């Protein structure tokens, strides 16, 4: 039996076909497609299925947004709305299951190998301790896992949309700057692909940081300024100090929110950074700013210092986790549609 699996993001969609025999680590077919190039998810999936020419009857998708009752989902940073029953009928599937994409990433954590991880804080994980996942990509997702006696169970949240809480006078100025442009400022408006340009604009406009002429040209030509800002902060030959400051401030605020999440769920099993951004900005996350902001929690600082923090390097973690969930349901003999 085969299973169609999707990791549906605001920027990229990863699709794979898995079998019960090979399990969640070995897809039969796999493809990554730009989400914004397609008018809806149905069109994108049909393109994939025509290319692979593999017959599927069951599917499970991790989607970047809230999943309501397992039946309806909205992609937070993409104009797609997904109705499970309509999509199932349109694709001719027997069953379809929807879960949150960061919940799917969380589901992959027990399957990850040491080579899939980069250690930011050594710490010491407590056996069976709750695990937190924070995933800055196009948006900011958060999830956690709890020990259920025989294994871990993943839980979705929309914690990335909570109100931003500044931790310094500079961050207070950032909040004031953003409140002039929008009614409300969440952590996603800062700690994500859509947030990085907000930090950069703040430094440039409010603090009058310099923007080189060559960078101005690149930003004007770019459809998405985020990759340009990241490259300009990392390129040893053409580096922009304002972009470096942008990534440093991003890392500090992400560290603070990762610490907040660790406290909220008491993540003694560790904190894992998923999403597309952390592997691309490892040099900034590995600096003292992230760790200091993560542990700077007053009387509870010793607790945070002992919590391991990792960056997930495996770009297929979300797909792997969704496949693990879907194949597990198939092994239980329960039609996926009953659990949607």
Image (cartoon, rainbow, N blue to C red):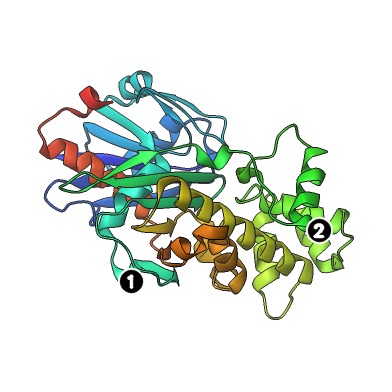
What percent of the width, then of the height, locates residue 254? 58, 56
Across and down, in percent, residue 165 comes to 66, 46
- Count of marks placed on residues: 2
Nearer to me, 173 or 237: 173
Distance between mark 1 and mark 2 Cα atoms: 36 Å
Structural crowding at the residue carrying mark 2, measured as other residues with C-alpha within 10 Å and reported as few (<14), some (14–19) or many (≥20): many
Looking at the image, which residue is at 48% across and 53% down? 275
Left or right: 100 in relation to 233:
left
| Residue at image mark 1 | 115
- Which corner quadrant holds the C terminus? top left
Label 1, secondary structure: give it. Answer: helix
- Choose between 280 and 48: the one closer to the eye: 280
Residue displayed at 80% across by 53% down: 202
Q: Residue at x 58, y 56 (%)?
A: 256
Could you tell me if the residues under marks 1 and 2 are in contact, i.e. CB atoms within 8 Å? no
- The residue that label 2 is drawn on is 203
Name the N-terminal-most of marks 1 and 2: 1
Residue 245 numbered mark, or none: none
Within-10-Å neighbours for mark 1: few <14, some 14–19, many 20+: few
């Amino acid at each position: 039996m085969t299973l169609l699996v999707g990791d549906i993001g605001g920027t990229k969609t990863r699709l794979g076909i898995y079998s019960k025999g090979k399990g969640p680590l070995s897809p039969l077919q796999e493809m990554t497609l730009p989400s914004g190039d397609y008018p809806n998810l149905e069109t994108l999936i049909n393109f994939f299925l025509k290319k692979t020419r593999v017959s599927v009857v069951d599917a499970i998708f991790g989607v970047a947004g809230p999943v309501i009752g397992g039946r309806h989902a909205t992609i937070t940073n993409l104009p797609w709305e997904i109705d499970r029953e309509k999509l199932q009928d349109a694709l001719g599937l027997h069953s379809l299951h929807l879960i949150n994409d960061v919940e799917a990433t969380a589901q992959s954590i027990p399957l990850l190998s040491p080579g899939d991880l980069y250690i930011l804080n050594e710490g010491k994980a407590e056996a069976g301790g709750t695990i937190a996942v924070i995933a800055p990509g196009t948006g900011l997702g958060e999830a956690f896992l709890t020990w259920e006696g025989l294994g871990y169970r993943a839980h979705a949240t929309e914690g990335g949309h909570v109100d931003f809480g500044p931790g310094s006078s500079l961050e207070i100025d950032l909040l004031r700057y953003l409140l002039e442009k929008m009614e409300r400022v969440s952590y996603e408006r800062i700690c994500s692909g859509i947030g990085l340009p907000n930090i950069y604009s703040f430094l440039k406009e409010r603090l009058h940081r310099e923007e080189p002429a060559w960078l101005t040209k690149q930003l004007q030509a770019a459809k998405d300024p985020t990759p340009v800002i990241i490259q300009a902060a990392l390129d040893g030959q053409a580096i922009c100090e304002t972009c470096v400051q942008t990534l440093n401030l991003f890392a500090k605020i992400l560290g603070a929110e990762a610490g907040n999440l660790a406290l909220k769920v008491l993540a003694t099993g560790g904190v894992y950074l998923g999403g597309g951004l952390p592997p691309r900005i490892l040099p900034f996350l590995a600096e003292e700013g992230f760790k200091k902001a993560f542990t700077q929690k007053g009387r509870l600082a010793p607790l945070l210092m002992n919590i391991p923090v990792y960056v997930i390097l495996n770009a297929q973690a979300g797909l792997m986790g969704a496949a693990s969930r879907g194949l597990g349901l198939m092994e239980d003999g329960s039609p996926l549609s009953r659990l949607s």
